[in-house]
Structure formats: structure tokens, C-alpha cells
Amino acid sequence: MDLPVALAILFFCVLLLSSAAIAVLLIRHCCLAALRRPDADPKARPVVVPQLQPQYELALSAEAPAAEQATDHKDAPRRLTWREVEALTGGFDEATVVGRGGSSTVYLARLRDGAPVAVKVHRWCGGERRLRAFRQELDLLRRIRHPRIVALIAYSDDHEEGGALVLEYLAGGTLADRLHGATTAPLSWPQRMRIVHDVACALEHLHDASSAGAPPVVHGDVSASNVLLDGRGLGARLCDLGSACEGFSAAVAPTRAAVGSPGYADPFFLRTGIVSKKSDVYSFGVLLLEAVTGMPAAGAPGSENLAARILPRVRAQGVAGLVDGRLGEGYDDEEAGDVARIAVECLAAQPGLRPAMGQVRAAIAEKAARSIAKADLGDHHIQLSKLLELT
């Protein structure tokens, strides 16, 4: 065979083998690619996770600064940006201010469905105590849920100079406004008994731990100004946990001041600097006297406060001549006397002699049961038998 012919045959064989090898590789590649396609292997398909809708949606337009309310206040409060807080308050519009405190301003806002909310804006301006009070109240409201404690709907805590709490709004104002305001109708005796019972329920819940394993909480500033009333049957909510102390099962020295409001502060605390759950009991005793007499807890400058002024008389003579004259004859003498005696026990000089809030709440529910049952809650009347089941 000639050499050129042999080389041609060899070249043809090499070309044929190379083509076959390339064909095999192409076929293998195509098969593997087909196997990797999502349609070929259901397990390889990407998992699509549905997006959860936020509990609240803030409208950031100037025309409708509002939030969408969660249908259930038991849902976890939503965290807002400071820009959303600005939108919700209309740029902190002074026309919407409904209250002011030492370091906070409360604005009235509305949710998308038209429901009103109170936006409590804190400004700490470099004050460590104010920042700590805001953090304390935020932490407690996020964890504590009770029908007699104001509910937290949303909050903002990412701004350097301030924070905000979006709270349920109660149109009835404060108990102080209703007891001492010149332009409001006086509260009836049944309404007063219903309100003090509601506050006692809230304090009992705080003192006996808000949830399983949670430490007890001392409110630290029980007063008529920190009791909010709804606009229907005047059910009450306890508010303002900025002075609260957590974990006080007995009586211990606090790491920071918690003096309470003038007229309500426990004298034992003022003397010793020791606060306990019994400090709240003392303040609640003052609140009871305030509800019975209609007199403010704090006296005029230079004069004695309510407890110091009338407590000796109540101990010696009862409440004859001390019941709020605006009530006329619309109260029960025996109930008024019983409630005043409960207040006297709460105001004992030594904390160890004061009853626990659970005992106080049970005593009010028993002694003022009929008046509490008469108080209209807007939606229904409390059944006397149901009320007595709480005792």
C-alpha cells in the first residue's frame, strides 16, 4: 500500500473517532442539563415562601398619615421608623396634641380604618433618666397584655433623640379630669366603684407576674392622672409604666428614683428610699379616698395632702360628711364606709401591715358588688354573680 493512501486512511479513522467522542460528550451534556431542569426534578424546584402582610401599613403621604390597626391587640406590636411616626402625627402637628408630660407629648392620630390612637412621643434630649424610662415602659408594654392596662399597638425606638409609643386611645380622658374637672359631669358612685375595681385588677396583674415565670412589677406612679377612661361605659385602663420597677417580690432598694406623684407617694419610700409592691398599695389607698371624697390627692402648696388631712377623721368617725357632695344621695352609705375602711388599711404606715393588691381587689368586689354591677360598660352590664366569682 502506498504511503499517502495509508496516511489518508489513518487520518480518516482519527477524524471518525474524534467525531464520535465529541458526539458522546454532547449527548451526555444535554442529558445532564435536562436532568438539572426544574421540570425534570420536582425536588429541585425553588420553594416559594408567601410574604406575610404587615400588621399595620402606614400611609406616608401628607394627605393620609395613618396606620392600619391590627385586628387583635394581642398581636405583637409593630416596630416603626421615625419617618412613619412623623407621618402618623402629621409632622408632629401641634393641632393634634391631646396631652403633655415632663418629657413626652401625646398626639391624636387615626388608623386606616378610622380608629383613633394616641401617639406618645418621648424626647430625652440627652437625659439618661428619660431614655431609661422610655425603654422601661416599652419593654413592659411589649410583654404585658391585660384588658385593664393600656395596650401598645406599635412603637419606634431607632431615633437618636426620641422614641414613640402608639397606644390605644381612650376618649373618656383621665380619672383626674373626671373627678376634678370643672367642665365635666361628676362621675356617679357606681362608675367610681367600677373604675377603682378595674385599677385594682390591673395592679393585681402586675404584682402577681404578668405571665408564667415573669417577675412581678411595681407600677411606681399610681394616680388619678394615670388612669384612662373609655368613652362608653367608663371602663378604666392603667397607663404610664415609665416609673415601673420589675422583680420586686418583697422590698428592695431600687437602682433609680421612683417617687410617684405628689399626694400619692408612699411616706415609707420617701423616708427610706425602699420601694415595693406595698408602695403601689399605698398609692391606691389614696386613689380610693379620692374617689369617695372627690378631693384631689395633693393639697395646695404649703398644706397637707388628702391622706394626711382626712385619714385621722376617717379612722375615728368614718366617712360621714366626707363623701363627694356632688353625688347627692346617689350612693350607698354602707358601701362608702366599707370602701373607706379598705383605704385605711392600704394607707397603713408600715408596708407590712398593708394588704396585697389581690386582697384589696377582692374586698372591693365584695363590698361594692352591687354598685359595680350597675356601672354601664357600654356593651353590657356586669352580672353580680360573675363579679362575685372573682373574689
Image (cartoon, rainbow, N blue to C red):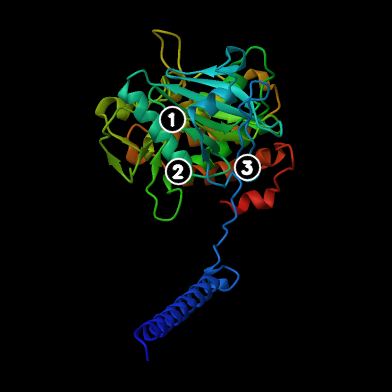
| Mark 3 and mark 1: Cα distance apart in space | 34 Å
Are the residues tagged 2 and 1 within 8 Å (C-beta)?
Answer: no
Q: Which residue is mark 1?
A: 283
* Image location (x, y in percent) of residue 79: 49, 37
Q: Nearer the viewer, mark 3 or mark 1?
A: 3
The reply to whether residue 26 is visible in this rendering is yes
Mark nearer the N terminus (3 vs 1): 3
Query: Can you tell which mark lies on residue 206?
Result: 2
Task: Report x, y in % for residue 195.
Answer: 60, 34
Q: Are marks 3 and 1 in contact (CB under 8 Å)?
A: no
Residue identified by numbered label 3: 70
Q: Is residue 166 left or right of residue 283?
A: right
**What residue is shown at x 69% (from left), y 42% (from top)?**
373
Q: Position of residue 177 (x, y in %)?
A: 59, 19
**Residue 50 occupies quadrant:** bottom right
- Numbered disc in front, either 2 or 3: 3
Q: Nearer the viewer, mark 2 or mark 1?
A: 2
**Distance from the alpha carbon under mark 2 to that under mark 3:** 24 Å
Asked whether 78 or 118 is in front, the reply is 78
Q: Is residue 226 left or right of residue 168?
A: left
51 and 378: which is toward the camera: 51
Please state which of residues 375 and 335 is positioned toward the viewer in this rendering: 375
> Which comes sooner in the sequence, label 2 or label 3?
3
Q: Do the numbered discs 2 and 3 sit on residues whose CB atoms are within 8 Å? A: no
**Secondary structure beneath disc 3?**
loop
